Image: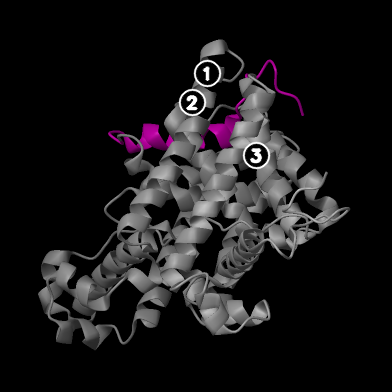
């Protein structure tokens, strides 16, 4: 006897079942929207873009979603339902914290592959939650926090049982989830036939760390170059303007990170700085110009950290650690945070390429340090490209660590945060190459 919802010998819902057809169309819309949001960002994607890519009219799309804000919210809700459902399955299959941790990581890669080969939906990267408003934001944040706590609880269980290495569980969870959230920005460059090997290489790094034997510890950099005396700024107009612009960029970065490009207002930034709109707009011509300058400022800060990490004769591992720990400390310092890269899709392609070129130069340098570490024996033989991506994702997410735990000692907090990437989740006696 066949169900009313499906035709005999068919793989889908009956065309006479309106509810099933409506749900299928809605799922297709959310999948396509997630795909475009991941590639283009919410600002660069219009409802017309989504409708056209599905062969729909914009009027037809409005039957399923009323505004882009509502569409982003629905995409994020479906993404979190997907992640929670995956954890449900993993937790039903095993009680082993190690297997659960591995399963959580692998499902990101499996889901990506399914979307690319057409056997599953595209899952939205949860990178613009801050841009949501009101109830939408509250609900999505609550679901993300619940997901975070589930992952953290598994790590805590593993540490208590001895199957996972002792670590500060909150910082470790944030670093892992930051690394995984970042996969949307680089997996598109990995051929599908290499996806399984890529997942295995990422799991190897998170399980066993980058370091061969050297533990992660405080490795201070030389101090940054001496700053001009701000008490003399009134006598130097050029320096006065530089300090003002620096304040604009720092505050702009904070607003863009919290609210996304669309949610950040130049008028609110001016008000937060307690300057007149006229004075603000004298220096900042547009929101796009401000965002571009915020990226350049962050890249200059990171470039200085990389330059200082190169001084001396330390091994490759220590130099790489220096960059990570110093970048973390900037994120939570008065000079931070660094710009969150989820806003880059708000920039036109020419500016985006310029920023990505500079970013890639820094990432390449970091990879060279890891290569040096492999040669001198301080770094395990690992996939350098994947290691770079995991580190980049963790650094990008580090600015939010204060939302999850107290940061009384930046040095100690930085070590706690990057511990998993350099030393791994597994006890060293159990670690395997």
**Which structural element holds mark 1?**
helix
Q: Are there few (<14), some (14-19), or many (20+) residues within 10 Å of tag 1? A: some
Q: What number of labels is visible? A: 3
Residue 67 % position (x, y)? 43, 73
Residue 314 % position (x, y)? 57, 40
- Residue linked to disc 2: 153
> Which residues lie in the magenta part?
407-433
- Residue linked to disc 1: 157
Distance from the alpha carbon under mark 3 to that under mark 1: 17 Å
- Residue linked to disc 3: 105
Residue 244 % position (x, y)? 22, 74
**Which structural element holds mark 3?**
helix
Distance from the alpha carbon under mark 2 to that under mark 3: 15 Å
Residue 379 in sight here: no
Q: Are there few (<14), some (14-19), or many (20+) residues within 10 Å of tag 3? A: some
Q: Is residue 38 above or below residue 334?
A: below
Pick the front one: 225 or 386? 386
């Amino acid at each position: 006897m066949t169900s009313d919802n499906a035709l005999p010998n068919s793989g889908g819902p009956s065309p006479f079942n309106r509810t099933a057809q409506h749900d299928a169309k809605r799922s297709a819309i959310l999948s396509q929207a997630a795909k475009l949001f991941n590639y283009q960002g919410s600002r660069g994607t219009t409802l017309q873009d989504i409708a056209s890519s599905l062969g729909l009219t914009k009027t037809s799309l409005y039957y399923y979603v009323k505004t882009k804000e509502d569409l982003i919210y629905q995409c994020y809700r479906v993404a979190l339902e997907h992640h929670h459902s995956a954890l449900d399955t993993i937790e039903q299959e095993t009680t082993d914290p190690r297997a659960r941790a591995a399963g959580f990581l692998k499902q990101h890669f499996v889901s990506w592959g399914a979307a690319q080969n057409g056997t599953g939906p595209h899952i939205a990267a949860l990178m613009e939650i801050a841009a949501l408003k009101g109830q939408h934001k509250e609900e999505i944040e609550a679901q993300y926090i619940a997901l975070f706590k589930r992952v953290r609880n598994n790590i805590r269980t593993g540490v208590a049982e001895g199957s996972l290495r002792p670590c500060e569980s909150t910082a470790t969870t944030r670093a892992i989830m930051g690394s995984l959230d970042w996969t949307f920005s680089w997996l598109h460059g990995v051929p599908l036939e290499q996806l399984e090997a890529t997942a295995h290489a990422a799991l190897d790094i998170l399980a066993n760390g980058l370091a061969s034997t050297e533990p992660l510890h405080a490795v201070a950099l030389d101090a940054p170059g001496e700053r001009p005396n701000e008490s003399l700024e009134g006598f130097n107009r050029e320096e006065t303007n530089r300090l003002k612009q620096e304040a604009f960029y720092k505050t702009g970065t904070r607003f863009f990170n919290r609210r996304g490009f669309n949610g950040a207002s130049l008028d609110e930034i001016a008000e937060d700085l307690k300057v007149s709109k006229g004075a603000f707009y004298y220096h900042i011509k547009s929101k796009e110009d401000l965002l571009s300058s915020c990226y350049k400022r962050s890249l200059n800060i990171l470039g200085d950290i990389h330059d200082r990490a190169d001084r001396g004769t330390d091994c490759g591992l220590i130099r790489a650690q220096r960059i990570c720990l110093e970048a973390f400390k900037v994120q939570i310092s008065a000079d931070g945070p660094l710009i969150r890269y989820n806003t880059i899709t708000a920039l036109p392609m020419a500016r985006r390429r310029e920023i990505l070129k500079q970013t890639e130069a820094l990432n390449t340098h970091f990879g060279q340090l890891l290569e040096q570490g492999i040669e001198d024996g301080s770094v395990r033989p690992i996939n350098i490209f994947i290691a770079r991506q995991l580190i980049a994702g963790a650094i990008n997410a580090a600015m939010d660590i204060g939302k999850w735990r107290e940061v009384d000692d930046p040095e100690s907090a930085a070590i706690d945060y990057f511990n998993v990437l350099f030393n791994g989740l597994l006890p060293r006696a159990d670690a395997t190459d």
